[in-house]
Image: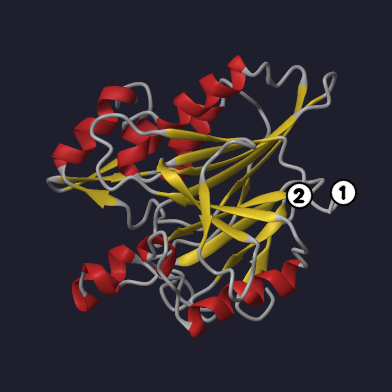
Amino acid sequence: MQEGFFYFQKMMGLVTTRHFGNFSFLGRVKKGEAIKDEEAALLLSLTSIMNLGNGQIFIPHFAKNAGDKARVVIVDDSTKAYNFSSRYSSNFFKLEEEGDAVIVLNPSGRGLLFYTADCPIVFLEVRHGDKGKSALVGIHAGWRGLTQGIIPRVLRYLRKMEYSSSNSNIWVNIAPHLGFCCAEYSKEVFELFFKRWPLHLYPHCYQANGENFKVNFLEIIREVMSSYFQQYPEVFPYCTACNAHQFFSYRKEKPKLGEENVGRFAALVLSRDYYTHL
């Protein structure tokens, strides 16, 4: 670990710790609003560490109320996004369209910056072996997104784009998140999981704890993705709640700080050919 962040091993990117700084402003800032100097300094630090040059880093606009359907945003040259830190850095663009997953087409010179405090962030990069095309994917895979089918929806998009494990190289990373030890939910939430992944078929994904149930996010994500690829994803072996001294944790800190005051750490990933055309 470097001071305040971890580098990915299989993908080009990093995850920050709470010692790096609080990225919750990424969810708060709106188009036309200025960010604070200390917030801009965090983005400048990422720019320097990753040597971002004049590339484009897209930040998701997470849906606050997606109803019963998690949304996927496709990023191409016509996608609307706004730069909220042009005074400090021209690299970072927040998407205008709401969504819990982002697929960046032709991602050379592009990357993704997600923010979280317990929810799993899943990054994929797929590169077609024959056609030379590629896509960079980020998924906010919290309990709402998972139970609303966000990962199968992303995989359907990739299949439509003719990406598959038989014709493409695939890299996967899962950022630190709430572990099986601490991901305890009410029966009402558990039943949403149960509808998609029945207990009798996926007993290793759940554990009863009194009237509540524990959910194994990592195993569910692996199960959902196993139909698409067989590679073992790179996983950071940290439960965010158990390691709240290193990572912001909504589960651990909300009772003391309140919902609005829990910070967020960042996960940044770049395409494998990010620097090729800068």
Residue type at mark 1: give it.
Answer: Thr
* Mark identifier at residue 109: 2
Residue 274 lies, with reference to residue 17, above or below; the image says: above
Query: Which callout, 2 or 1, points at the residue further toward the start of the chain?
Result: 2
Element under disc 2? loop
Q: Residues within 10 Å of mark 2 (few under 14, many from 20)?
A: many
* Mark identifier at residue 54: none
Q: Residue at x 50, y 84 (%)?
A: 38
In terms of depth relative to the viewer, which is nearer, 84 or 246?
A: 84
Point out the image quarter for the N terminus: bottom right
Residue 114 appears in the rendering: yes
Q: Position of residue 6 (x, y in %)?
A: 65, 67
Q: Residue at x 66, y 51 (%)?
A: 111
What residue is shown with label 1?
A: 276
Residue 127 appears in the rendering: no
Residue 257 lies, with reference to residue 211, above or below; the image says: below
Q: Position of residue 193 (x, y in %)?
A: 28, 32
In terms of depth relative to the viewer, which is nearer, 201 or 99?
A: 99
